[in-house]
Image: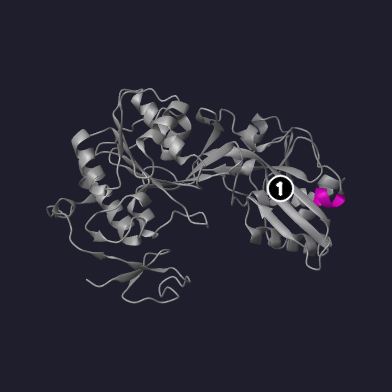
């Protein structure tokens, strides 16, 4: 069959190349897909046909989950590893993907479970050196260094481990496909082969994936659709704290996050997550406190703002951990409703601790921090700001407000500013505000 061209963003396939994807409109994403010279019959067996069944009549047993031995990783996975589950984990080079996989092998090995670690990038000596550094001592870990996908599948079928790890999916290939490892065709076919193997044998498989400069898993988007769970490592390379986020999970909720600390002996779970995102308890100029919901947990986060005179013709608008457009909208709301002149000021916003969030409840905390920086005055001590701000300056209630208030109260915050339209039980710590004009009076009085 002739070569085809596949969009790396959406997976659209075409017979000829074009600069712009006809399906999603992305530029320079159409990449050539190689020819398949011949397929191994073992990877393409046709399953027997089944008749449609009434969904209410289907009987099933709840899947028993295999605990990883780490509560943070279990939380991100939805409670543990499910039989036949296929997990793709991505992140920047050196952020800790292989380290976490080696530790996972050790945790399961200490439970008496067999783990098959397959590496296509490093030699056995390199992996042995890492295992010594991480103090891996389990005799239940088997190491296989190969670039051949079929060799990996055959080893899984022979050993029948409790877990298989492939590091990385971009380094392995199928010999009868006329393209190099890491190409679209190799990624798609190798993943498809591993999916069939894992599902048919009931062996969960972790796959490590490289990422592009934009931070997404390299290869066609269809790669993420083929697997059950997609995990991403977040955090600055030089920051000791790393965040593992689930962006897709067929066996649990999405957007769950796990917090880890990089130490000399590997990644350790963080016992008190709120300590990661708060610098200190003292009220500082340009600093406010918000509360976000990530998955099933709430976190107190610190919003830092700096508004200073601009030295250039066009003032700078810089955000870290938030969307750039969010800052532009909030600044326009401030100028319109409070008549604050910001067109000659550089404005910088940062979420402390390296966390990234799109939670709209941070709107009120961001505006409070900007006002504090402009007025050069700290906000009231022990205060938390929770609310979404509309374009007309009104403060709107956010989801799971009771859980956010409970988290703030548990940590000792005495002043909790929320929307005046929220229906809440009487609480002396809660202060209701209808718009940002009321906020301005409350924090500058």
Residue ID at (28%, 32%): 162
* Dot 1 alpha-carbon crowd within 10 angstroms: few under 14, some 14 to 19, many 20 or more: many
**Which quadrant of the figure has residue 66?**
top left
Q: Taking the image as drawn, is residue 50 in sight?
A: no
Position of residue 67 relative to residue 332, above or below, is: above
Residue 51: % across, % down: 14, 54
Q: Is residue 360 left or right of residue 140?
A: right
Return the x and y of residue 173 as percentages of the image width and height. Answer: 29, 53
Residue at the image position 28 percent from the left and 29 percent from the top: 114
Q: Nearer the viewer, residue 375 or 127?
A: 127
Question: Dot 1: what SS?
Answer: helix
**Residue extending furthest toward the left:** 48
Which residue lies under the disc numbered 1?
365
Tell me if residue 245 is in the magenta stretch.
no
- Residue range (magenta): 371-375
Is any part of residue 177 visible from this angle? yes
- Location of residue 58 in the rendering, given as x and y in whole percent from the top left corner: 21, 45
Q: What x and y, as percent, mark residue 395?
A: 70, 53
């Amino acid at each position: 069959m002739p070569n085809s061209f596949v969009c790396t963003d959406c997976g659209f396939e075409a017979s000829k190349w074009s600069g712009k994807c006809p399906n999603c409109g992305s530029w320079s994403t159409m990449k050539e897909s190689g020819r398949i010279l011949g397929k191994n019959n073992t990877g393409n067996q046709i399953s027997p046909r089944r008749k449609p069944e009434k969904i209410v009549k289907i009987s099933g047993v709840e899947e028993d989950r295999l605990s990883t031995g780490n509560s943070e990783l279990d939380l991100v996975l939805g409670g543990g590893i499910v039989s036949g589950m296929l997990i793709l984990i991505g992140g920047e080079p050196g952020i800790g993907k292989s380290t976490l996989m080696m530790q996972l092998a050790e945790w399961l090995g200490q439970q008496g479970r067999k783990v098959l670690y397959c590496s296509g990038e490093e030699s056995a000596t390199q992996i042995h050196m890492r295992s010594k550094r991480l103090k891996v001592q389990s005799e239940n870990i088997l190491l296989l260094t190969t670039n051949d996908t079929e060799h990996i599948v055959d080893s899984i079928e022979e050993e029948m481990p409790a877990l298989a790890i492939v590091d990385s999916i971009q380094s392995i290939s199928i010999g009868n496909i006329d393209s190099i490892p890491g190409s679209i065709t190799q990624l798609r076919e190798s993943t498809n082969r591993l999916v069939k193997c894992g599902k048919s044998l009931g062996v969960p498989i972790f796959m490590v994936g490289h990422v592009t400069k934009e931070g997404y898993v390299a290869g066609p988007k269809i790669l993420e659709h083929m697997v059950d769970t997609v995990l991403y490592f977040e955090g600055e390379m030089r920051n000791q704290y790393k965040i593992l986020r689930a962006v897709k999970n067929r066996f649990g909720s999405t957007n769950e996050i796990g917090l880890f600390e990089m130490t000399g002996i590997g990644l350790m779970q963080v016992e008190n997550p709120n300590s990661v995102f708060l610098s200190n308890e003292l009220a500082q100029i340009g600093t406010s406190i918000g509360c976000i919901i990530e998955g099933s947990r709430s976190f107190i986060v610190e919003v830092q703002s700096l508004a200073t005179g601009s030295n250039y013709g066009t003032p700078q608008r810089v955000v870290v951990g938030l969307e750039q457009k969010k800052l532009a909208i909030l600044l326009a709301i401030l100028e319109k409703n409070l008549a604050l002149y910001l067109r000659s000021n550089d404005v910088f916003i940062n979420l402390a601790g390296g966390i990234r969030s799109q939670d709209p409840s941070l709107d009120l905390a961001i505006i409070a921090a900007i006002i504090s920086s402009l007025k050069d005055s700290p906000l009231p001590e022990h205060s938390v700001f929770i609310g979404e701000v509309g374009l007309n300056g009104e403060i709107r209630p956010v989801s799971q407000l009771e859980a956010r208030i409970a988290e703030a109260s548990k940590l000792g915050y005495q002043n909790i500013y929320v929307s005046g339209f929220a229906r809440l039980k009487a609480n002396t710590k809660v202060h209701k505000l209808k718009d940002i004009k009321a906020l301005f009076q409350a924090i500058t009085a």
